[in-house]
Amino acid sequence: MDLIRSAADLARLDTLRGVRPLVFVPTMGALHDGHLSLIRYGAELGPVVVSIFVNPTQFGPNEDYDAYPRDLDRDLALLKPLNVAAVFNPPVQEVYGQPGGVTIQPGQRGTGLCGADRPGHFCGVLTVVAKLFGLVNPDVAIFGRKDAQQCLVIGQMVDDLKMSVRLIDAPTVREPDGLAMSSRNRYLSDDQRRQALCLSRALQQARVRIEDGERSVKTLIQAMTADLQKADAVEYAEVRSVPDLMIPETVSGRTLLAVAAQVGPARLIDNLVLDIQANEITDSCLLDTGRDLWT
Ligand code: AMP
């Protein structure tokens, strides 16, 4: 496993380019099984490059950039058995030059949901993802469906800027009790950990309501908001169409159920992506490009 720290040394990736696609999994480190599932899937497609980079520009002024967990040795030990070809772990200066450089603003999909609660967040995400795509030049990039809006905002950037990378959204990995895995779960006390279960439960109960025939977005949002009351503060409970993230009046076809809430010191998000047909409700994905690769 090659540990690469500078842009210049990324030339070493050229030995990996060939018949199989070069697969890229961007992360901020503090790896857990959610990250590892993306990497395991990627390894089936081709050689995998993982980036570990805590991106300063996607954190707001009052967010946890300084406190964000960083433990490179632990992360490398977790990656070693996974047959990862290279890890890119640049210092901030290597990615961002002087202030005043080019940034990328999200399109319409970046408004609302996390875009409303975290101004500037998706600009930071898109800017760093574009830089990392430019540096690594992958054929395929894998993102977690857990960050649904992020997947769709990046998908729109790749489409609109005609970037030649294929995107895949991989399913959310959960703890046995349903809590979506997150690097921020480690901020939670035992009591807060129990409180945090209200996010995945609100989503599951919404799914049951839909399976029982409920189609009104207003009713589903009211029920999810009520189910989230164990959280310290509800940021949003929303229902959106996929992939455009519009607000429908009734649910049908590919649909995102998304929640965000503050639990103790952690801002947590979770979602379900469903394909809602008259006779059948099934799990679905966000990005069409991944559909035939990830089933
Ligand atoms: P992060 O390090 O939080 O930026 O996450 C790196 C990648 O892992 C992103 O594409 C996330 O969506 C994905 N990811 C984070 N948590 C999970 C999870 N529980 N299941 C699947 N993917 C995840």
Image (spheres, rainbow, N blue to C red):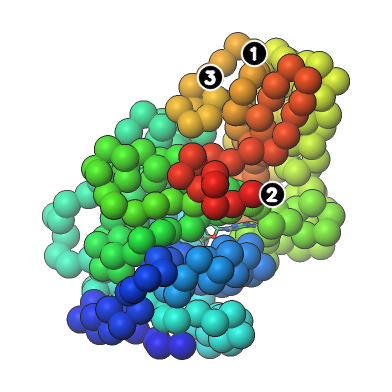
**Residue depicted at 45% across the width and 34% down the height:** 116
Is residue 255 left or right of 67 when viewed as pictured? right
Give the mark, 2 or 1, whose residue is nearer the N terminus.
1
Instruction: Classify residue 160 by image quadrant.
Output: top left
Q: Secondary structure at mark 1?
A: loop
**Which residue is under mark 1?**
250
Name the residue nearer the viewer: 50 or 52: 50
For label 1, the crowd category at 10 Å Cα-Cα, with few meaning under 14, some 14 to 19 and many 20 or more, is some
Q: CA distance from mark 1 to mark 3?
A: 9 Å
Q: Is mark 1 within 8 Å of ligand 1?
A: no
Indicate which quadrant contains ligand 1: bottom right
Within 10 Å of disc 2 (Cα), the crowding (few <14, some 14-19, many 20+) is many
**Relative horizontal placement of residue 148, taking residue 137 as reference (left or right):** right
Residue bearing the label numbered 2 = 263
In this rendering, the answer to whether 112 lies above or below 287 is above
* Amino acid under disc 1: Thr
